[in-house]
Structures are given as structure tokens and as C-alpha cells.
Image (spheres, coloured by chain):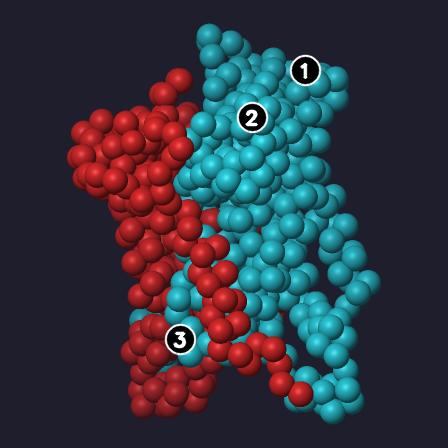
């Protein structure tokens, strides 16, 4: 086109310029909220940096890292985080798959079932923690009331007051809260499996159990893997539910890495050490994610 | 051979299990919120409130500035949603429609940003917000929430933009529209359902966020609902009926929202999930 003016070019920019302009806000924000903080985090981890009491900034090299490796609180929190992940991710998968299979039945009205899967997803994690803390209340909680009616134990379980019981209560709460999202993803996967596969299996005389293991599970694998990756990444960051249920207690028996980092940074204002803890957690989650992606690469 | 699930009553049981699993916490909290303090600490515990009372709801609003928290949550979640949509719509259009090299890499970059644990970003974000004096402000939460919503919004919008026939846009351009004109007059109206779906997901995400809200906005004037309600509990006391009433107040808006738009929400969630 001859004689294009600057105005024309502004109204009709080239693909490249337009692409740059359209992507700029997103990448600017990513730089500001993700890339810069990660750089700052690594930088901080080499300094003695406390925001309380007017403390200065002192370069300490790898001292913070040495402290982390000798810190029993870190290993305790790391153990709890990994345990929560190992328990609640498969737990939520099994419960979620069960819910998805039930929800996939041919109901006349679909909305009550769909809403029942959406509600736990939309409920803030912090609220789930509060509600289940009330469920697990030793004296007036509904859980112990049901247990009393069914099993009549000599004394009620002190759910949130005993380390192992508190840990179990937190895992149960996380499984309840997260299995719905699993179920929604798996339900979408179930609905994409062609009916003809089951009809063919019926003709061949395959039982329902055989159909489940030979058709449903293999066909569902892509959805299962996506759901597992999502869930693992969020499980490693577990904060809201233990924070609202036990604040990490009794002692620090239910404290996760995210809670330890939050406490160190926000409550104690020890930014240097908090950053070092965060770098360690970051490395841990990278390892887990890489492991997952590698496994998936092999399966695909 | 007929399936055992063909029987109507068994299907009803299946639906019952799913519905009870989804609703029982909310129902139990609703019942608790209607009980008097004395009924709550009577044993054995009651299931149905004997003397239903709304006093707990009054107290939920007077003990703590619940209305203020509600306003803060609405302000933060709404502005985060609007800005998330704006930023991700622009990016999604570029990825879906423009003839860019490495568009897959660009999308991967945006999605991978959601894999970074938020709590590791918390430390530097807290430090920076403190330095620039943004602690206890809406901006402190809205900025990170936009990034938080970016992956899922972009994924949903990319697939919506891709579903709009390119011919429509080309036709508009042949008729004398500029590229921007075609975007505004043709693509955006057609993508409206996608924008809406992404918007609901962004709103729920922002409404639910706890860690940043707890850490960055501790001042009561800027607390959001999840943070504010957690603080109803004293050092040794848990005023359960009042907490329950506050929870119901906080849950109802979001429950109504997803009840009305459930099909869109499910579509958006699984789309964002399966493509991620």
C-alpha cells in the first residue's frame, strides 16, 4: 500500500508490533510479581536481613543455608509438607474418582450433583479449615458425636490437641476440600470416553470391573495426570487449612514449610532467613515437578 | 445385561452421596449459626436448633467490622477480576490470532508462572510492598492476584478466541475495519461468553486467596473476608455460633454466583485444567 501515513500505521500496526503491545502488560506483570521477586529472593538468602529493630544488612554468604540444614524446625516442616502431599494427593484422587464415577451416572437433573462438586471447590481453603476445626472439636464436634453413637469409645478423641490426630484431621480436611476439583476434572475426562468402547466390551463379555480397569482408567489417564500435577503443586504449598485448624500445633507437629516461611518472614520479620527457607522450598517443589514431568514423558 | 445403576433408587443413592458430601459442611454451619450459645455447649449435641435465633448474625456484624471485610473482599476481587481479564484478553488474542513465532513458548511461559509456589514469592513481595509503602492497600493484593489469575484466564480465552472463525474477522477487515476495529467490533462480542467464564474463575480465585491477604493487609480496614473471619477466634475462645454466622454471610454470595453460572464454571475449569 503506497502512501501509508503514521496514523494508518498506528491504527493498523504490523503483526509483530501488535503482538508486542498486546503481550507487554502480561509480561510486565510477570516480571514485576514473579521474576523480580525470585531474583530478590535468591539475593536476600545470602544476607542477614532483619526488618525488626533497625537491624542492618550484612552479607553472610552461605551461612543461612548452613543454618537451614541444621534447623530442626525446617526438617520438621519439610517432613510434614511431604507427608501431607503423599497422603492427600492420592487420597483426593481416590475420593475424587469415586465422586466423578457417581456424578457421571445418567441423572434426570444434573444441577444438584454439579453444584455439590462446585461448592467445595469455591469454598475458601481458610473457611474449610475453620468449618472442619468445628467438626473435629473434642467436646461439641459432630465427628466425635457420630463416633460416640457408632462405636461408643470410653473417651472422645482429642482430635486437634494430639499431634497424630491433628495431622489426620488436617489430611481429611484437605482431601475433602480438594477432591471436588479432582472430580470435576475427571468427570470431564469420563464424559469424553466414547460409549461405543463399553458397548464393544459388553459384546465381548467383559465384566464391569474389567471394563473399569481396561477402558475407564486407561482412557482417563491424561485427566488423572493433569489433576495429579495440579494437586501436587498446591499440596506442597499447604498453608490455609493447617493455619486455620491448628496454627501448626500442638507444638509444631502440623507446621508446613509455607507456615514456617510465613512465620519467619511476617511474624519475626527475618527476611534473610525466610528467603533462604523459601529458596529451599522452591528447590524441593522444582524437584517434585521435574520428577512428575519426567514420569509423564515416559508414560505418554 | 443391564447395569445395576439402571435402577432408579440406586441412582438416587449415588446422587445423595455426592450431594451430601458437597453440602454437609455448609448445612452444618448454617444450623450452628442458628443455635444459641447455651444450646451449643449442651451435651449430647443437638443437630436441629431448638430455639432458632438470628442473634448470632447481628453479633457477627457488631463484634467485628464484617461489613467492612465484605466491602474489601468485593473491591479487591472485582478489581482483580477486571484487570486480570484486560491483561489476559490482550495476551490471549495475540497468542490465538497473530502470526507470531514461538506462540506455544509464550503460552507456556504464562502458564508456568502458576507453578511457582506463591509462598516463596511472598517474602520478596512483602518486603517490596513494605518498602514502597503499599502494605495495607487494595493495590498490594490486586497486583499479585492479576498474576495469580493470568494462567487460567489466558488458557480459557485462548481457546475461545481460537473457536471464533477467522473469516468473520477477515470479512470485517475487508469491509474497511482496521485490525483493532475488528477486534473491538467482532472478536470481543463473540468472545463474551469466554470472557465471562474467565471472569468468574478469576473472581473466585481472588475471593478465596488467604496467604497474601493475611500477610500484606493486616490492618482491619483492609482485611478481606477469609482473614477477618479467622480473627473472630480469640486466643482461647472460639465463638462458634458467631463464626458460623459470619461464614454463612461470606459463603452465600459466592455460592449464589456459582449456582447461577455452574455450567460456565465447570466448562472453564476443565478447559483450563485439561489444556494446562
> Dot 3 corresponds to which residue?
A109
Q: Earlier in the sequence, mark 3 or mark 2?
A: 3
Per the model, the C-alpha gap separating discs 2 and 1 is 53 Å
User: Which residue appears at 22% of the width and 41% of the height?
Assistant: B52
Q: Is residue B270 above or below residue A45?
A: below
Chain assignment, label 3: A
Q: Which mark is residue A155?
A: 2
User: Which residue appears at 39% of the width and 18% of the height?
Assistant: B235
Per the model, the C-alpha gap separating discs 3 and 1 is 64 Å
Palette colour of chain A: cyan
For disc 3, the neighbor class at 10 Å (few under 14, some 14 to 19, many from 20) is few
Palette colour of chain B: red
Q: Nearer the viewer, residue B34 or B147?
A: B34
Q: Which mark is residue A183?
A: none
User: Which residue appears at 62% of the width and 85% of the height?
Assistant: B2
Q: Are marks 2 and 1 on the same chain?
A: yes
Q: Are marks 3 and 2 on the same chain?
A: yes
For disc 1, the neighbor class at 10 Å (few under 14, some 14 to 19, many from 20) is some
Tell me if label 3 and label 1 are in contact, CB under 8 Å: no
Amino acid at each position: 500500500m503506497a502512501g501509508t501515513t503514521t496514523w494508518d500505521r498506528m491504527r493498523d500496526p504490523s503483526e509483530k508490533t501488535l503482538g508486542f503491545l498486546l503481550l507487554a502488560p502480561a509480561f510486565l506483570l510477570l516480571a514485576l510479581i514473579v521474576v523480580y521477586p525470585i531474583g530478590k529472593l535468591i539475593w536476600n538468602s545470602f544476607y542477614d536481613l532483619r526488618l525488626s529493630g533497625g537491624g542492618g544488612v550484612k552479607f553472610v554468604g552461605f551461612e543461612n543455608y548452613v543454618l537451614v540444614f541444621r534447623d530442626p524446625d525446617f526438617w520438621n516442616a519439610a517432613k510434614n509438607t511431604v507427608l501431607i502431599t503423599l497422603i492427600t494427593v492420592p487420597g483426593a484422587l481416590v475420593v475424587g474418582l469415586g465422586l466423578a464415577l457417581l456424578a457421571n451416572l445418567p441423572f434426570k437433573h444434573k444441577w444438584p450433583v454439579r453444584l455439590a462438586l462446585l461448592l467445595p471447590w469455591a469454598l475458601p481453603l481458610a473457611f474449610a479449615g475453620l468449618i472442619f476445626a468445628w467438626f473435629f472439636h473434642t467436646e461439641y464436634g459432630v465427628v466425635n458425636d457420630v463416633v460416640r453413637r457408632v462405636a461408643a469409645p470410653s473417651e472422645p478423641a482429642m482430635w486437634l490437641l494430639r499431634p497424630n490426630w491433628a495431622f489426620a484431621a488436617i489430611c481429611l480436611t484437605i482431601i475433602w476440600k480438594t477432591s471436588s476439583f479432582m472430580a470435576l476434572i475427571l468427570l470431564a475426562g469420563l464424559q469424553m470416553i466414547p460409549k461405543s468402547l463399553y458397548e464393544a466390551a459388553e459384546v465381548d463379555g467383559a465384566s464391569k470391573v474389567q471394563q473399569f480397569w481396561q477402558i475407564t482408567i486407561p482412557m482417563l489417564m491424561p485427566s488423572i495426570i493433569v489433576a495429579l500435577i495440579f494437586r501436587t503443586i498446591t499440596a506442597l504449598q499447604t498453608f490455609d487449612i493447617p493455619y486455620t485448624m491448628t496454627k501448626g500445633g500442638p507444638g509444631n507437629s502440623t507446621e508446613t514449610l509455607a507456615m514456617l516461611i510465613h512465620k519467619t518472614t511476617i511474624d519475626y520479620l527475618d527476611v534473610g532467613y525466610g528467603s533462604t527457607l523459601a529458596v529451599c522450598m522452591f528447590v524441593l517443589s522444582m524437584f517434585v515437578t521435574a520428577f512428575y514431568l519426567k514420569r509423564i514423558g515416559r508414560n505418554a | 445385561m443391564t447395569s445395576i445403576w439402571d435402577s432408579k433408587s440406586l441412582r438416587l443413592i449415588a446422587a445423595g452421596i455426592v450431594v451430601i458430601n458437597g453440602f454437609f459442611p455448609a448445612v452444618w454451619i448454617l444450623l450452628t449459626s442458628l443455635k444459641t450459645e447455651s444450646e451449643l455447649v449442651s451435651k449430647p449435641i443437638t443437630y436441629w436448633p431448638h430455639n432458632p435465633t438470628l442473634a448470632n448474625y447481628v453479633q457477627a456484624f457488631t463484634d467485628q467490622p464484617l461489613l467492612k471485610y465484605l466491602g474489601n473482599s468485593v473491591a479487591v476481587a472485582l478489581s482483580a477480576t477486571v484487570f486480570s481479564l484486560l491483561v489476559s484478553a490482550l495476551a490471549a488474542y495475540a497468542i490465538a490470532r497473530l502470526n507470531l513465532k514461538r506462540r506455544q513458548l509464550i503460552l507456556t511461559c504464562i502458564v508456568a508462572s502458576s507453578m511457582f509456589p506463591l509462598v516463596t514469592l511472598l517474602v520478596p513481595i512483602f518486603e517490596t510492598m513494605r518498602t514502597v509503602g503499599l502494605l495495607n492497600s487494595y493495590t498490594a493484593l490486586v497486583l499479585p492476584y492479576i498474576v495469580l489469575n493470568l494462567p487460567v484466564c489466558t488458557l480459557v480465552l485462548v481457546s475461545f478466541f481460537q473457536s471464533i472463525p477467522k473469516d468473520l474477522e477477515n470479512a470485517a477487515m475487508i469491509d474497511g475495519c482496521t485490525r483493532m476495529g475488528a477486534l473491538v467490533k467482532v472478536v470481543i462480542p463473540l468472545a463474551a461468553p469466554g470472557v465471562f467464564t474467565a471472569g468468574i474463575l478469576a473472581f473466585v480465585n481472588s475471593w478465596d486467596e488467604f496467604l497474601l491477604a493475611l500477610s500484606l493487609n493486616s490492618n482491619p480496614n483492609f482485611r478481606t473476608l477469609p482473614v477477618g473471619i479467622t480473627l473472630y477466634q480469640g486466643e482461647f475462645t472460639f465463638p462458634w455460633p458467631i463464626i458460623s454466622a459470619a461464614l454463612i454471610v461470606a459463603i452465600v454470595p459466592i455460592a449464589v454466583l456459582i449456582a447461577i453460572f455452574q455450567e460456565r464454571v465447570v466448562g472453564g475449569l476443565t478447559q483450563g485444567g485439561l489444556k494446562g
